[in-house]
Image (tube, rainbow, N blue to C red):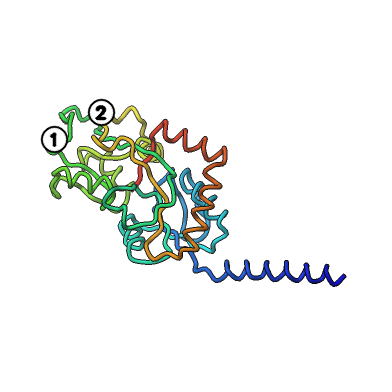
């Protein structure tokens, strides 16, 4: 009986110590943006959408206390580069960003398309150099915006807005000549505003941006325990059959826009 009690108390102490270590961890702040159909949510605890569901599964597996905020991309990126214990997604992994984050794992593959309205037959653009003769709608400070700037586009050519839907509407109403966006994002807003794919034409895929991957990343200064728990959860979830199948479908279709 004494041995049984001792074993029981040892198990209880181990459980309490484990619980205390989890409780002692700081809350994880998750930042993303409203970008249907990839992620749709209100600030709080629940997120849904194609990419968000993968991230949600990983965070829930980790058991970490967390809070989700939906911000414009520029603000999310600012938080993730200035505050500890911040998870940002989906974020493109580039050489410039490599040292700024702890990279947990890939959640999406995408491609970037340049579109014009089919009715705008006056637009003669078959290359990025040609596109410099027209106005281009972009999402302010995202990867594609910065990419076009690096390619020599002037600020007066780039119509940068803080909302993707606004960018699409400006394009549909002829306020911008071209738009850089992914097919799945464009399709969502076309349908929402009672338009069809037959009204748009993809001029080109952005050169050198054909197979970029979007990741979950953690800010510098994040607790090593949080990094470890999320890394382990990512490995568990990412090796599940449903996760692998989902990633495969997205990689093959390459139909996602990200930052």
Is residue 212 shown left or right of residue 216? left
Q: Secondary structure at mark 1?
A: helix
Position of residue 19 measured from the top left corner of the image (x, y, whole percent): 63, 67
Identify the residue shown where x is 44% and y is 52%.
104
Q: Quadrant of the N terminus?
A: bottom right
Give neighbour class at mark 2: few <14, some 14-19, many 20+ (Cα, 10 Å).
some
Using the image as rendered, state which of residue 14 and residue 194 is in the foreground: 14
Using the image as rendered, state which of residue 37 and residue 3 is in the foreground: 3
Using the image as rendered, state which of residue 105 and residue 33 is in the foreground: 105
**For mark 1, what is the residue?**
129
Position of residue 64 measured from the top left corner of the image (x, y, whole percent): 54, 61
Identify the residue shown where x is 46% and y is 63%.
224
Give neighbour class at mark 1: few <14, some 14-19, many 20+ (Cα, 10 Å).
few
Q: Disc number at residue 169? A: none
Identify the residue shown where x is 22% and y is 39%.
174
Q: Secondary structure at mark 2?
A: loop
């Amino acid at each position: 009986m004494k041995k049984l009690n001792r074993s029981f108390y040892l198990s209880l102490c181990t459980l309490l110590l484990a619980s205390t270590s989890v409780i002692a961890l700081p809350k994880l702040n998750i930042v993303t943006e409203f970008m249907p159909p990839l992620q749709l949510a209100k600030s709080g605890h629940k997120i849904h959408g194609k990419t968000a569901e993968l991230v949600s599964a990983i965070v829930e597996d980790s058991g970490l206390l967390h809070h989700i905020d939906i911000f414009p991309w520029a603000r999310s990126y600012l938080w993730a580069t200035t505050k500890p214990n911040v998870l940002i997604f989906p974020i493109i992994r580039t050489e410039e960003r490599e040292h700024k984050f702890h990279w947990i794992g890939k959640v999406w593959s995408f491609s970037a398309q340049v579109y014009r309205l089919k009715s705008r037959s006056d637009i003669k653009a078959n290359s990025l150099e040609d596109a410099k003769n027209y106005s281009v709608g972009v999402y302010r400070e995202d990867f594609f915006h910065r990419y076009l700037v690096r390619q020599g586009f002037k600020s007066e050519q780039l119509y940068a807005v803080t909302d993707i839907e606004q960018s699409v509407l400006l394009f549909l109403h002829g306020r911008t000549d071209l738009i850089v966006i992914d097919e799945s994002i464009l399709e969502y807003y076309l349908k929402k505003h009672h338009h069809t794919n037959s009204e748009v034409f993809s001029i080109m895929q952005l050169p050198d941006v054909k197979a970029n991957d979007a990741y979950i990343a953690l800010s510098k200064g994040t607790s090593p325990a949080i990094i470890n728990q999320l890394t382990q959860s990512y490995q568990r979830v990412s090796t599940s059959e449903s996760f692998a199948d989902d990633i495969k479908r997205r990689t093959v279709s390459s139909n996602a826009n990200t930052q």
